[in-house]
Amino acid sequence: MIIDCHTHYWEPKHLGEAWLAQVGRIKSGEVNERVCVTPDVYRRAMRPAARSIVFGMQAKAAGIMVDNDDLADFVTRMGGGVIGFLSVDPTDPGAADEVERASQDLGLRGVKLGLPYQAISPVDERALRVFERCERLGLPVLVHQGAIFSSAGRMVEANPILLDDVALKFPQMKLIIAHLGHPWVNETAIVMRRNPNVFSDVAALYRRPTMMMAGLSAAHEYNVLDKVLFGTDYPFTNVEGTIEGLTPIFEAMSRTFPGELGPSHLEELLHRPTLELLELPDDGVSLQRPDAAGVGADGAGGDSPS
Ligand SMILES: [Zn+2]
């Protein structure tokens, strides 16, 4: 079963001027940042994945603010197969309480943070208060800690090595470092190696093949490849496109590590038991169930990207 652990929900109303003005800095130039994520559009992008984790993001400094109630409503409209993660901006004084409200009242099962986008260091007291609440509530945290396109925050505070302190302080909290923490992929590997509670994902990184290869090599050499999870970063890319992009990368890896690393490791990545590893519940409902809107030929659903 393919599980996409890294997907975004937003609608145009959630995106501010700063975000829209700067998102064009993403390398590919293929991003439709004004996409309105509806269940039909989303489900098509997830093919052939059977489950996914979806989140909004709240980052005032970067100009994106997805309301947790809107995200919870999207999860409900999907009708199963998706697990919703709430987001808070740790610079907001009510952030820890919102973690509690959105998890208890809205049924959201984890937390998404984008610390450089939120212009805050992981070891800032305000961020630690959020992590403390997440650990107490048993919520895994997927954190973007690495390079960003936005001018928000400081790169000196964006290195995933800083998450080592967080992982040590909150050993019961599962932490997923998005995008292998690029460009600091080696730092991500060593933080994963010594902290059983730390994982990472490959979302969107196939578009930087040398970075992806460096990250996978580090994960392999430090023996933590089994803690690297499959994710896309939808709507920046989709599941089929990501598999297509990863295939030649794993083929190339098999030449670097003959007999050690190759296409079978891509299969393992695609079928990683992510829900089990993160101790998340599986509702047993497939995103690709035949009766769901958006399943089938392109155009079968009513919605299209706006
Ligand atoms: Zn993302």
Image: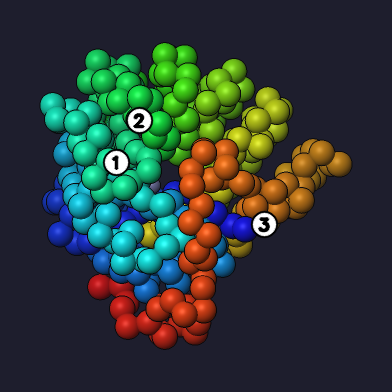
Q: Which residue is mark 2?
A: 137
Report the side of 226 relative to 133 (left or right).
right
The crowd level at tag 1 (other Cα within 10 Å; few <14, some 14-19, many 20+) is: many
Inspect this view and state whether residue 84 appears: yes
Query: What's the distance in space between the residues labelled 2 and 3, CA to CA?
Result: 38 Å
Q: Tell me, for residue 103, which label it has, or none.
A: 1
What's under tag 2, amino acid-wise? Leu
Residue 225 pos. (x, y %): 66, 36
Decide if residue 182 is in sight here: no
Q: Residues within 10 Å of mark 2 (few under 14, many from 20)?
A: some
Q: CA distance from mark 3 to mark 1?
A: 37 Å
Q: 258 or 220: nearer the eye?
A: 220
Identity of the amino acid at label 1?
A: Ser
Kindly identify the residue that appears in the image at 25 percent across and 59 percent down.
73
Q: Which residue is mark 3?
A: 247
User: What is the secondary structure assignment of the residue under circle 1?
Assistant: helix
Q: Residue at x 63, y 47 (%)?
A: 272
